[in-house]
């Protein structure tokens, strides 16, 4: 049966920036299929490998050992029982501040890294919109329709090329959609090559199309990921907002 779980944005960021998407995925999967305490057996290993697309048990044990070393999972020396720390404990361990989470469908574990990317991009869109709302004193929140590749790279602490690859994975998995955005410039087409050769960074995004010079702007992005806040006060409803 499909189930939805909340995955903190900062955990998504951690998984991507530290190159630990598969280890985080295993931790989340074990939290999903156990009560938080479990004895490791062949059936659990087999299910984990099939769900997370591990080719060998060696990969499973490699990632499980990382979780043990980092104390995301601890072992009772007497009984051999494994205990998974709570999300709150993990948040305190890594000093997570934001309570924003992406709502993840547990039937989609094989594309979870793309979900991490989509969640981060959705979060960046929303925070940019809130910042603009506060800056300009707007009465109504309006999310930005774009997140630049540079901003995504800076947020994750990864090279720009890696950020672009991440975004493509989120698009391929259907978590976000992108649409190219161009603005027509009132510049003579005959000078296009001059701008490209001598314009340096300012003209990197110039394109010659349909007998005119256009500037390629950041892609417009729409998201299929819903964000929700963890730890709201008792009795207060959680709201779902589509970015």
Image (spheres, helix red, strand yellow):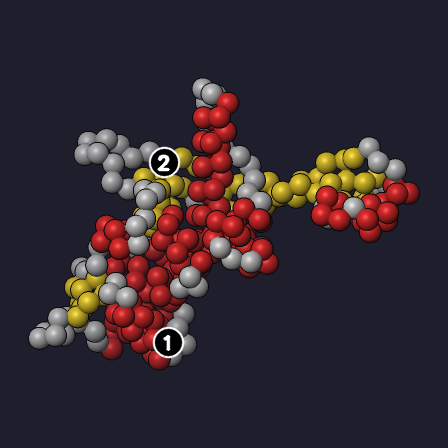
Q: Can residue 202 be seen in this view?
A: yes
Q: How crowded is mark 1: few (under 14 residues within 10 Å), some or many (20 or more)?
A: some
Q: Where is residue 144 in the image (x, y as percent from the top left)?
A: 53, 34
Q: Mark 2 Cα within 10 Å, few/some/many (few <14, many 20+)?
A: few
Corner quadrant of residue 191: top right
Image coords of residue 164 (percent x, y) = 58, 55
Of the image marks 1 and 2, the number of the one nearer the N terminus: 1
Kindly report which numbered mark, 1 or 2, lies closer to the viewer in this rendering: 1
Helix, strand or loop for disc 1: helix
Query: Mark number for residue 121?
Result: none
Name of the residue lying farthest toward the right: 190
Q: Residue 69: give x, y in percent of width and height.
A: 27, 70
113 vs 92, left or right, is right
Going 25% across and 74% down the picture, which residue do you hit? 43
Viewer can see residue 110: no
Relative to the observer, which residue lies in front, 178 or 24?
24
Q: Quick one: SS at disc 2?
A: loop
Name the residue at 18% across, 59% down.
35
Q: Position of residue 121 (x, y in %)?
A: 48, 46
Q: How many marks?
A: 2
Q: Which of 153 and 181 is in front in this view?
A: 153
| Pointer 2 residue | 240
Q: Name the residue under label 1.
A: 59
Q: Which residue is drawn at 54% across and 46% down?
A: 151
What residue is drawn where x is 25% and y is 40%?
Answer: 231
């Amino acid at each position: 049966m499909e189930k939805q779980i909340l995955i903190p944005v900062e955990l998504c960021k951690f998984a991507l920036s530290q190159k630990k998407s598969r280890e985080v995925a295993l931790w989340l999967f074990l939290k999903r299929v156990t009560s938080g305490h479990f004895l490791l057996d062949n059936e659990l290993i087999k299910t984990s490998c099939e769900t997370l697309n591990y080719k060998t048990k060696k990969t499973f044990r490699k990632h499980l050992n990382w979780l043990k070393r980092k104390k995301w999972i601890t072992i009772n020396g007497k009984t051999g029982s494994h205990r998974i720390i709570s999300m709150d404990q993990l948040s305190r361990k890594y000093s997570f501040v934001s309570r924003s989470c992406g709502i993840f469908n547990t039937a989609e574990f094989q594309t979870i890294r793309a979900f991490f990317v989509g969640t981060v991009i959705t979060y960046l869109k929303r925070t940019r919109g809130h910042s603009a709302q506060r800056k300009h004193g707007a009465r109504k929140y309006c999310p930005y329709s774009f997140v630049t590749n540079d901003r995504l790279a800076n947020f994750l602490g990864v090279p720009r090329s890696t950020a672009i690859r991440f975004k493509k994975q989120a698009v391929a998995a259907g978590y976000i959609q992108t649409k190219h955005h161009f603005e027509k410039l009132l510049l003579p087409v005959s000078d296009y090559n001059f701008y490209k050769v001598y314009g340096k960074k300012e003209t990197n995004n110039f394109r010659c199309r349909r007998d005119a010079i256009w500037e390629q702007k950041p892609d417009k992005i729409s998201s299929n990921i819903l964000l929700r806040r963890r730890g709201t006060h008792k009795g207060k409803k959680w709201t779902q907002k589509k970015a």
